[in-house]
Amino acid sequence: MVKKKLLAVAITAMLMVTGGFALYYSSQKKIETTTQFVSWGQQILIEYPNHELVPFSNLTPTTLSVLHNGTVRTAIHYILSAKATSLQYRTLAIDLRSCNVTFKCGTSPSNTYIQPLSGNGVDVSIPLDDTWYDIKDITISISDIVGSLTDGTYTLTVTPIGTIFYSADNTFSGMVSPLPSFSDTLTISGTASLACNAHGPYTAILGNSITCTGTATGGTSPYTWLWDFGDSTTSTLQNPSHTYTTTGTKTITLTVTDSASHTATDSSTATISPSGGTAPAWGTIWEITHTSIANTGANTDRAIAQPVLCDVTGDGIQDIFTTDGYSDNSSGLGNNNGQVWCFNGKTGATIWHYGPIYDIGNHAVMSIHDLDGDGKPELLVCGYHITISFNAENGSIKWSEIDRAYRHDKPAVVLKLGDTVYVYTCKNSNGAPGGIVKRLGSTGAVVAQSTAPIEGPCYGGLSAADINNDGKIEILLGDENTGVGLSCFDTNCNMLWSTGIECSTQAPIIADVNGDGYLDVIVADQETHKICVVNGASPTGALLFPEFGSLPSDSGDIFTASVYDLHGDGHLEYIISVSGSILVYDLTTKTLDATIANPHSSAGYYFPPIIANVYGDSKMEIVNIYGDYGIDVFDSSYKYIYNYPAGNSGTGASQSLVTVIADINGDGYNEIVQLQDPHWTGCYKSVRVIQTSGAATSPAATAKEQFYTYKRGQVSQYVAYNDPDLL
């Protein structure tokens, strides 16, 4: 055995054992810069009675990042060393046979295996010369670890198995066994191979831009992005816009690099057609007025759920799904009823209709997903006391649950975990144990439920994303402060944190506000009437910075705002409609960026604006609804550029409600789907599709979710179907 002097400094803990002496573990960390491989040296320091002990600091767990598919970090390597310094004992004989290696992540069960050590019999005899001697190498294979563990942060505990014999004057005096353990913190990541998707194919008319969508899975985040557009131009944005100067089919290449320098590549195409022809003029393509189901109670509220889109007939047309219904504080069937409609997006013809549905209530929120894995879409509807899965093609019910003890607040979240699709909803029980509910998407069977005292999310509900970069999706809830307030849950419905911030009627918005790579959570605090941003990296839901701004009570702080970088300067804007104007706050400078005045003679409604590329160029517009005055469009510099008046179905004032913007009929131009209530009777009566003159982006925007995505930013954009990276 080769003698090796090691500096006994830094991180040490004393463990008293039998035999009249103390053992120390001292950890040394060495970083080999050529390979970026981190190895840890562990030493057993043996001290005897009547010897002055060296004052070491406490043992601090260390962190090692393991990349399963990397080529350098193949093992964790420990060196056990010892020295004898006592005048009482002259020789130590050390015999190590194996090690117990245990991994534990949070509250999950431990994984333990035995690591054999080479050789038998006495490994080394240590004379009294105050010199460190290597005893044994312990090498733990990364493939052994990753073969039994998933990504996560583990406490790794190594317990050497063996015996230390000590002697005086070469005469056997005693032995020590068992030996103490030492621990590290081990972060396992990158167990899945890095892959990327360039999506597409993309199309545009010469002079118009395309917007590319890049996604990545596996590897170790954060990722960096490099797009090659095939015309000697590149971009490092994840979702860049690009305008070609020549026609033809271009090859677009996306290269993604993860934090461990692994790369993945994918290609797509962009077909650029010659310019020419005349863009269509703004106008109503079709408008349908239907008869709502009568409500038997009083105190009705209107149906204001955003329509969702899906081509269910396979003809390239985005079909339109809507719900209507009443909500009433009175009890009894018939006071919270409604219905579900599916319209052909091109003609307005009814594809299917289901109703009456008791207990569906007002603003029953919808989403489109393949819930049972058969390759066909389902329409998920979360109503007042009912959750329903419809076959989106024909309106037949797959499963439903009615629970009149709780309100089924919304919107829901649908996640594919492994090979199984789960539906997450929240049950409002007015302070009693309601909580987050996890169901099988195929049958609706409940598999987990929290018992959080949720009070009243109302039109708000759930959002979802991996906000803290731990490789797992977190579910965010907006609630009243008499319930849990703004809170966060894992995918097993366990509450991770709760802030008590009141944000009922809002689905929390998720975005990286400060550019640190973590997704933050944005709501309006309905007690302080200020903008609140929670740090996504915080395990306790701490604020990223103090609340700021001034939002009018009961208008600017009710509904979910829009969040987007309108100017392309890296600053996210927080955009909210209030009675009579639009407020725009800069989330980076935390200042009011603009107050956009109402261009009409009367105050509008405070339904949230939509951010959309209405004209198909490289700029996003603010699209707002002003009651009797229809739809207003403002450019990214807040200039008022267009108004399309409200429809004239029936008699009396025509109130514009929620809207969605996308290419509905496949003509390559954006259309607007709008719900209207011509009589203010408590339920929308009219659906109309409005032609715009703006070329649709490629790929076209999708609208399968309330507020377009699970991040709930109210931005009309393309989202790959069931793509977890764009939640």
Image: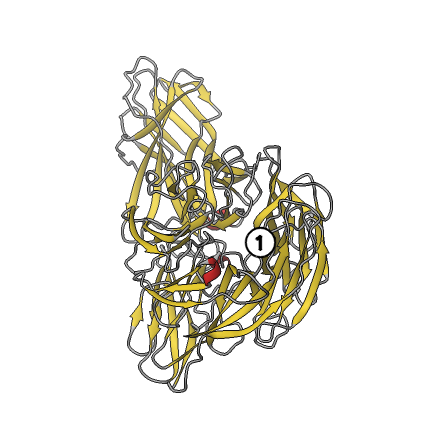
Does residue 313 appear anywhere in the picture? yes
* Residue 361 x %, y %: 64, 50
Depth check, front residue: 124 or 254: 254
Going by the numbered disc 1, the residue's amino acid type is Val
Q: Taking 517 as reference, is 331 left or right?
A: right
* Residue 441 x %, y %: 65, 54
Residue 602's quadrant in the figure?
Answer: bottom left
Q: Is residue 40 above or below residue 687?
A: above
* Residue 628 x %, y %: 48, 60
Depth check, front residue: 48 or 387: 387
Residue 292's quadrant in the figure?
Answer: bottom right
The image quadrant where one finds the N terminus is top left
Depth check, front residue: 598 or 67: 598
Question: Residue at the top extreme?
Answer: 50
Depth check, front residue: 247 or 199: 247
Q: Taking 162 as reference, is 449 left or right?
A: right
Residue at which label 1 appears: 414
Question: Residue at the front extreme?
Answer: 652
Residue 621's quadrant in the figure?
Answer: bottom left
Q: Is residue 237 above or below residue 667?
A: above
* Residue 635 x %, y %: 34, 64
The residue depicted at 45 percent of the width and 35 percent of the height is 499
Q: How many marks?
A: 1
Q: Is residue 83 above or below residue 683?
A: above
Q: Taking 418 as reference, is 502 left or right?
A: left
The residue depicted at 57 percent of the width and 41 percent of the height is 493
Q: How is the image coloured?
A: secondary structure
